[in-house]
Image (cartoon, rainbow, N blue to C red):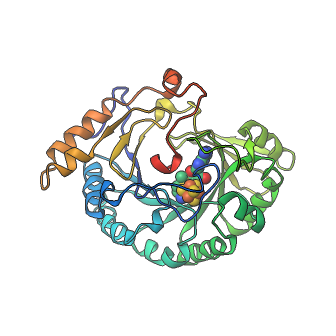
Amino acid sequence: MTQPLVDPFQRAITYLRVSVTDRCDFRCVYCMAENMTFLPKKELLTLEELDRMCSTFVRLGVQKLRITGGEPLVRRDIMTFFRSMSRHLDSGALKELTLTTNGSQLERFATDLYAAGVRRVNVSLDTLDEEKFARVTRWGRLPQVMRGLDAAQAAGLKVKLNAVALKGFNEDEVETLTRFCGERGMDLTWIEVMPMGDLGNEDRVGQYWSMKDLRARLAESYTLTDLPESTGGPARYVRLEETGQKIGFITPLSHNFCESCNRVRMTCTGELYMCLGQEDMLDLRPALRNHPGNDAPLEQEIRRAIGLKPEGHDFDYSRQRADGQVSRHMSHTGG
Ligand code: SAM
Ligand code: SF4
């Protein structure tokens, strides 16, 4: 029997988030600069390497795999990877294969995703206003995403919307988005914006808007009941008594749930980040590339990395930059 992955604080690591590309067909103002330099292709793990990497994690006890990016669905031939991962669903080793997407390619891929065993998708959408959507994503077009949502639901995928809360931008859409999700049977989660990377300020669409204030805003229209459930991540949930909807709030750098943290993140080049709030990582690519056909060194490196997982990021704010920013972009570690 392979020993499962357990970190020094006795947390079982069962959830891997994998970025499969740093590229994207949008340029969301809080995530990317308009002119991005992307990684040369050879730096990226190939689809075969991604498969080997993820399969090794699954063998070591990872039960949930979330594919992200960049925009995962713009990676060439990504469906080959999804289809290949479905063998781990079939074997029962993997309990869930899912993705976070901007929705632009769902019209094309929803049916294939369902066929590969994907049952739920998170779609990022901050506004239902076409003009505002174009402003916040710079390159995105709302109707395309709407068609993606339709296709996803028609294919049988359960959709959760993730909206970044931006003061002065979508403050006035709390009710509209709630109603939209209610009508379409989609869950909704709000995310607090993180100051990521050095994006410059010229494109600031909105500013930091705390979950506390957003919650207060929601409480003006609905009766909120706190739900006790935790997914091992930084989300908290409430139920709207009037509609029965479940609404989530994510404070990315909160440390409410560090003690039950079950996840690690891998970049598209094979760097493993043990904690979103810290810069510490271990590059797994050498162990993978230098030992084709032998996964033992990779397994060893993964175990070494998990052994370095910190107790929580609140212990180590000193390692962030002086202005409190985490210098890598969300598209790098994959949100
Ligand atoms: N392209 C896909 C998408 O947009 O869903 C997947 C990758 S994206 C980096 C993952 C999530 O990170 C999205 O929900 C996005 O809104 C969020 N995100 C990006 N930059 C952020 C930031 N600075 N603060 C908070 N959330 C951010
Ligand atoms: Fe692309 Fe997602 Fe980042 Fe927007 S948030 S630029 S869609 S990776």
Image coords of residue 72 (percent x, y)? 46, 62
* Count of numbered circles in the view: 0
Up-down relation of residue 14 to residue 148 (above or below): above
* Residue found 74% across the figure and 68% down from its top: 183
Q: Would residue 129 be visible to someone looking at this image? A: no
Residue 125 to residue 155: above or below? above
How far from the left and from the top, in percent, is residue 118? 44, 66
Residue 279 appears in view: yes
Q: Residue at x 33, y 29 (%)?
A: 308
Q: Quadrant of residue 251?
A: top right
- Residue at 43% x, 26% y: name it: 311
Residue 44, percent from left and from top = 33, 56
Q: Is residue 49 left or right of residue 102?
A: left
Q: Is residue 227 left or right of residue 321?
A: right
Residue 318 as seen in the image, left or right of residue 139:
left
- Where is ligand 2, by quadrant? bottom right
Horizontal side of 50 relative to 193 (left or right) equals left
Q: Residue at coordinates 42% horizontally, 39% vertically from top-left?
A: 262
Pick whichever, 322 or 78, lies toward us. Answer: 322
Spot occupied by residue 150 in the image (x, y as percentages of width and height): 63, 76
The answer to which image quadrant residue 77 occupies is bottom left
Q: Residue furthest right?
A: 220
Quadrant of the rendering where the N terminus is positioned? top left
Query: Which is nearer the eye, 54 or 208?
Result: 208
